[in-house]
Amino acid sequence: MSDVKLITKKIRTDALIIGGGTAGCYAAIRLGEASVGKILLVEKAGIERSGCLAAGVNALNAYISKGHVPMDYVEYARADGEGIVREDLLLSMSERLNKVTEDLENRGLVILKDENGEYVTRGWRNVKINGENIKPLLAEGVYAQPDVTVLNHVNITDLVTQRVHGKTIVRGAVGFSVKEPVIYEIEAEAVLIATGGAAGLYRPNNPGFSRHKMWYSPFNTGAGFAMGFAAGAEMTTFENRFVALRCKDTIAPTGTIAQGVGAKQINAGGEIYEKEYGITTPQRIYGTVEENRKGKGPCYLKTEGISKEQEQDLFKAYLNMAPSQTLKWIESGKTPSRQSVEIEGTEPYVVGGHTASGFWVDTGRMTTIPGLFAAGDVAGGSPQKYVTGALAEGEIAAESMASYLDKKEKGDEPEVEFSQESAYAHHFEVKDNNITWRGVEEAMQKIMDEYAGGIHTDYRYNESRLVLAREKIKDLQGLVDDLAAEDMFDLLHIYEVRERLLVCRILIEHLLARKETRWHIFGENADYPQQSDEYKKYVNSRLENGEIRIIFRQLVKGESYEHPDK
């Protein structure tokens, strides 16, 4: 039992942004410029170095180069997603990719240019940058807005909703400081969730001390998914998981090598196997898994024999975003020109910036709860966002929020009631027991790995295993309320486990619902190994009376989607 005594602070704002990553920061900038009133941005870390861009990035992977149009990007994303995408969301995002890229450059981002002053591209969809300072530049833009207040080191856990005129609308959120014994009750007229996707659901490649070496930010726990789902928002396409193809052990990106020096995927015998399986994102990892299953591994990106100039370019590129890879090459003496780079798949993630998982939103990025918006990795239906797509969605959401606030009638809602304080306090009152948050988290990851299609089973799952996963995850959820916290950091970890467990439950139900293999590896259903026209539709879900209800929706094509009750 801890002696922590919690105090409560109340805040009133017009617009609340939860999550200070790429989309959240850009939304704050645009809302500040729109003069909508008070804007509060809440981030559980610090916005200068939080989210997926914390360490920087060496390319902007979503850009429309000369000779191409936004619809080309829509077609690319649709093909990569096997048709299960939202064309309206993809198009509205794609139309803004170049604009936000130019805005980043104007803010001080170094974008590499050729002798003619044109951006240096890799393929037709991305441009090279020196992006170590990309997040500080965005933070600087946020702090420059006089109407924006930033609350760093505060973890939001729950949304507050009310029934008003027969509809459930969002009225704010509640959370706590990760450093001080302070609860924050925040009343807001509109809320944007920009918390990112979910990592840490499955047992990772590297155990123990190195468990943080993963593809996606280990601090993205699915918090936005969990709080939105618990409030009644509809989710989509969680079964479209993402598994990254990475450099072995360091989990550094492989696209830099594949696109930067044109390296092909080869097996241990030197055969170029990507010709057999294809080169879409899921096909690249599928081919690697299959070659290993056939006993033809390890698998590599063929860099042996590249020029010293190309090798130096790779050293610099990885120092910009994944320095452990460059250090590994130098320390071992096995540089890429001398030895090809071994590759492997990561554990699965739920991330709407690469696949289509996330909130079910309308074209303005509003969720099924009026006043609640979603952008970036937490918003579903629009894959292949990357950095610039997240910026574009932050901007779209900001514009929609401004319109919503302008039209919203003030003064007719009841007083907001908050009820989370006792739940937080309970964890400090629990007497010490042998169950810890870390123990629950490791059990969760083991269950998901073995029963819900993790690395352990070559990403395959079947109904029998998923049913067991459902039962076991529910059992773990029952342990969370009795976890003891000694300080606010302990409380943060407890709530992160709570969030991940709920996301696991949603994911399991989605995997069970799609009775086909639409995407190899991402959704490798051993009971149904082929695609089925019957399932060329969205698998959505809502929480109703404590149970997860699956909803099938027909594809949205060529029009702007609005929620039926708007």
Image (spheres, rainbow, N blue to C red):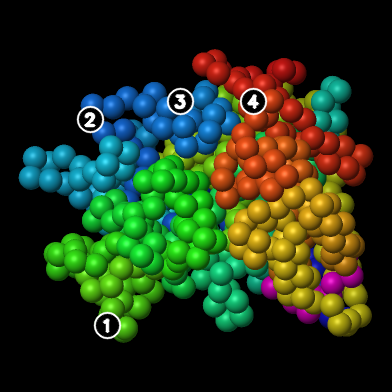
Return the residue at label 4. Answer: 533
Of callouts 3 and 1, the N-terminal one? 3
Viewer-nearest of discs 4 and 1: 4
Viewer-nearest of discs 2 and 1: 1
Query: What is the C-alpha distance between the residues marked 3 and 2?
Result: 17 Å
In percent of the image, x 63 and y 37: which residue is there? 530
Q: Disc 2 residue type?
A: Lys
Q: Disc 3 residue type?
A: Leu
Q: Where does the magenta region start and end?
A: 481-490
Left or right: residue 62 compared with residue 346? left
Is mark 3 in CB contact (under 8 Å) with mark 4?
A: no
Is mark 2 in CB contact (under 8 Å) with mark 1?
A: no
Query: What is the C-alpha distance between the residues marked 2 and 1?
Result: 40 Å
Return the residue at label 2. Answer: 66
Q: Residues within 10 Å of mark 3 (few under 14, many from 20)?
A: many
Q: Residues within 10 Å of mark 1 (few under 14, many from 20)?
A: few
Return the residue at label 1. Answer: 333
In percent of the image, x 38 and y 74: which residue is there? 324
Query: What is the C-alpha distance between the residues marked 3 and 4?
Result: 24 Å
Return the residue at label 3. Answer: 91
- Is residue 86 placed above or below 173 in the rendered structure? above
Q: Disc 1 residue type?
A: Gly
Where is residue 23? Give x, y as percent: 50, 44
Left or right: residue 7 compared with residue 553? right
Viewer-nearest of discs 3 and 1: 1
Query: What is the C-alpha distance between the residues marked 4 and 1?
Result: 51 Å
Of callouts 2 and 1, the N-terminal one? 2
